[in-house]
Amino acid sequence: MYSSSSSIQAKKVDHNFVVEGYSATKASSTSFPSNRLTMGGYNWEIHYTPSCYEEGEYWVAFKLVFLGPAIDLKPGGTTVKVNASLRCHLVVPTMSPNWDIDCEVAWLDREDKEWEEKSVAHEFLKETDSSPWVRLSSRKVVDSYEPIIGCDSFRAKCTITVLMG
């Protein structure tokens, strides 16, 4: 009788992507990167855009960008194959009694369909490869949520998972 087993291990890191000045970001056609994050021996960035145009409308979206190994172990720029995923959901401000005067707000994980967690998995083969955009919500829905408009900010909780081995 033969016996075998396999184990797939993963490393995870959470990142809070804070967008202050949301209204100003809507005027840009470029994406906005996070700080460099190191996970699973590789460097990553999370990019945000409020201008992902698909299905006839604009979306608030995020993507994962592969920046290569944290330490160059193999000279000559050999090809790597890294499997990773990005999960994100919007965390939005709640209205305080004086929210129109003071935008020091509490943050709320909303559990309705408009704010559900979205994810994408991708195989990265070279530096600067990026995942497809993760569309979190249409810009129209985000723009209609009064605390975001009032405070001109929101955050997205993003999790990077890198498969190891």
Image (cartoon, rainbow, N blue to C red):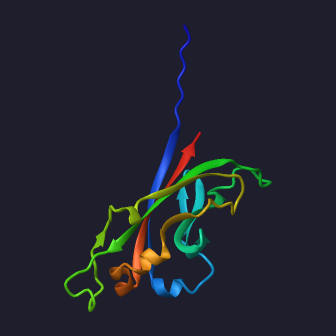
Image height check: is 156 above or below 140? above
**Image x and y of residue 27, in percent:** 57, 87
Looking at this view, is 57 or 25 the one in front? 57
Image height check: is 108 above or below 147? above
Q: Residue at x 43, y 76 (%)?
A: 142
The image quadrant that residue 91 belongs to is bottom left
**Image x and y of residue 155, in percent:** 41, 72
Q: Residue at x 32, y 65 (%)?
A: 110
Farthest front residue in view: 56
The image quadrant that residue 145 belongs to is bottom left
Looking at this view, is 63 or 160 the one in front? 63
**Image x and y of residue 22, in percent:** 46, 83
Q: Residue at x 47, y 51 (%)?
A: 12
Q: Quadrant of the C terminus?
A: top right
Image height check: is 7 above or below 15? above
Farthest left residue in view: 97
Farthest bottom residue in view: 101
Q: Residue at x 50, y 44 (%)?
A: 10
| 100 on left or right of 61 | left
| 23 on left or right of 49 | left
**Image x and y of residue 71, in percent:** 64, 56
| 93 on left or right of 30 | left
Q: Quadrant of the N terminus?
A: top right
